[in-house]
Image (cartoon, rainbow, N blue to C red):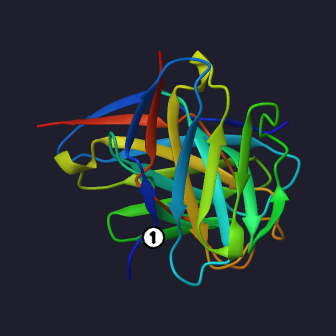
Amino acid sequence: EAGVAQSPRYKIIEKRQSVAFWCNPISGHATLYWYQQILGQGPKLLIQFQNNGVVDDSQLPKDRFSAERLKGVDSTLKIQPAKLEDSAVYLCASSPSGGSSYEQYFGPGTRLTVT
Amino acid sequence: GQNIDQPTEMTATEGAIVQINCTYQTSGFNGLFWYQQHAGEAPTFLSYNVLDGLEEKGRFSSFLSRSKGYSYLLLKELQMKDSASYLCAVRDSPALGRLYFGRGTQLTVWP
């Protein structure tokens, strides 16, 4: 079974530029999560999708971050404009359903450096 | 808010046993997870507890006390490859499935 795919793996941009990350979840997984992991910290949930609808985006900085999951499969996370404090690893995870499944499966992440 | 606390660092030697503690204060509780994360890699699932008691899985065991807001991960017969960050996470709602993570405990295993 293929895992969660993410691209790019690494990205370096200057502050005020824009950037987009892509995630392809495990086939058949209805729920998709985007997390931000700052160095030395645990992952923090940014947004959760159930199929193509947003379930929770309470911790997403909506003035600069946006995300979509068209057709309930792939998802993109965008930052515009980026700030220095956005430097982090952005992890995508998926699970078969929101509550009944035990675990979330994580992708390898995209390491973003904002200079 | 959600508060999940675990030690920042621990060290141990090969073959030893180590216990990583986690305490939590959350508005809801629907399970506690432990994940392992090697440097530069994605977190991988280790264990899940939703009822009080001990869950054993090979060299790894996890314990939960809901009344105390406390869990621990026990690693036996440590190997060098166990050097990693161990993340404690709480799921607050069965409907949403979202996880709140602690900062992680960086375990270093020495030969």
For the residue marked with disc 1, what is the amino acid? Glu
Residue A114 on image: x %, y %: 50, 21
Q: Secondary structure at mark 1?
A: strand
Residue A53 on image: x %, y %: 82, 68
Of residues A91 and B16, the one drawn nearer to the viewer in this rendering: A91
Measuring 47% from the left and 15% from the top, which residue is drawn there?
Answer: A115
In the rendered structure, the answer to whether residue B77 lies left or right of residue A88 reads left
Quadrant placement of the C terminus of chain B: top left
- Callout 1 environment at 10 Å: few (<14), some (14 to 19), or many (20+)? few
In the rendered structure, the answer to whether residue A57 lies left or right of residue B50 reads right
Q: Please determine whether, in this image, residue B7 is positioned above or below residue A98.
A: above
Quadrant placement of the N terminus of chain B: top right
Instruction: Name the residue carrying label 1.
Output: B56
**Residue A99 visible in the displayed image:** yes
Most extreme residue toward the right, as rendered?
B27
Residue B48 on image: x %, y %: 58, 66
Measuring 56% from the left and 60% from the top, which residue is drawn there?
Answer: A93
Of residues A78 and B60, the one drawn nearer to the viewer in this rendering: A78
